[in-house]
Image (cartoon, rainbow, N blue to C red):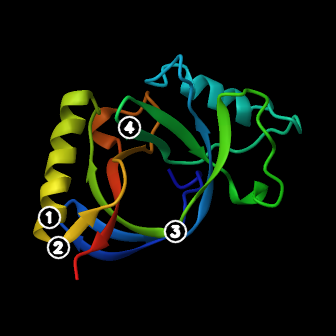
Amino acid sequence: MGKYETPDYTVNYKEDEFEIREYSDFYIVEYQNEKDKYSDNGFGTLFKYISQDNTDNLKMKMTIPVIEEIKNEGQTIAFVVPSANLDNIPKPNDPSLNIKKFEKGTFAVIRYSGTSGEAKEQKMMGLLESWIGEHKYLKQSNFMLAFYNPPFMPPMFRRNEIMVRVSQIE
């Protein structure tokens, strides 16, 4: 996993599988398509983008995690823009892709291994939401799933996370 770039963050607090992290700003290329509300074609579209399907015909390095944001009706999927491309992020050729700034902030995170299906994700979101409340934080965004490994990685070695932007109750 060390060969892939990840966004910068610091861990402010850790308890078992939970963390409070402070992320720096970074950029993502996000797939959102009204005709594909659950982003079934998102990963392939994003992969084409980093494989030269962009206005600069530029090949970019794969980064981790792949981020899926759970929305009321569907989800989006995004790749993190590599730091080498920050000065000149190529514009996507595909209209379902947008370049967005992922604003710095405080996030609560739960980390887990194995495969990540809907039932497990719902369970982890519930655990994270309870933990946030117990630790005097308020949820400030949608839940985001973060996947760090390729599908051929054995499940017991996979790193998955669910994260959500939070603020502390004063």
Q: Is residue 31 rendered to the left or right of residue 83?
A: left
Residue that appears at 72% across and 32% down? 49
Residue beneath disc 2: 136
For residue 19, which quarter of the picture?
bottom left
Kindly give the residue lying farthest to the right in the view shown: 56
Q: Secondary structure at mark 3?
A: loop
Residue beneath disc 3: 104
Q: Is residue 25 rendered to the left or right of residue 162?
A: right
152 or 97, nearer to the observer: 97
Whichever of labels 4 and 1 marks the residue nearer the N terminus, that label is: 4
**Distance from Cα at disc 2 to Cα at disc 1:** 5 Å
Whichever of labels 2 and 3 marks the residue nearer the N terminus, that label is: 3
Residue type at the position of mark 2: Lys
**Distance from Cα at disc 4 to Cα at disc 1:** 21 Å
Residue that appears at 37% across and 38% down? 70
Residue type at the position of mark 1: Gly
Q: Mark 1, residues whose alpha carbon is within 10 Å: few (<14), some, or many (≥20)?
A: few
Q: Are marks 2 and 1 in contact (CB under 8 Å)?
A: yes
Q: Mark 3, residues whose alpha carbon is within 10 Å: few (<14), some, or many (≥20)?
A: some
Q: Secondary structure at mark 2?
A: loop
Residue type at the position of mark 4: Lys
Tag on residue 71? 4
Q: Mark 2, residues whose alpha carbon is within 10 Å: few (<14), some, or many (≥20)?
A: few
Image quadrant holding the C terminus, namely: bottom left
Whichever of labels 2 and 4 marks the residue nearer the N terminus, that label is: 4
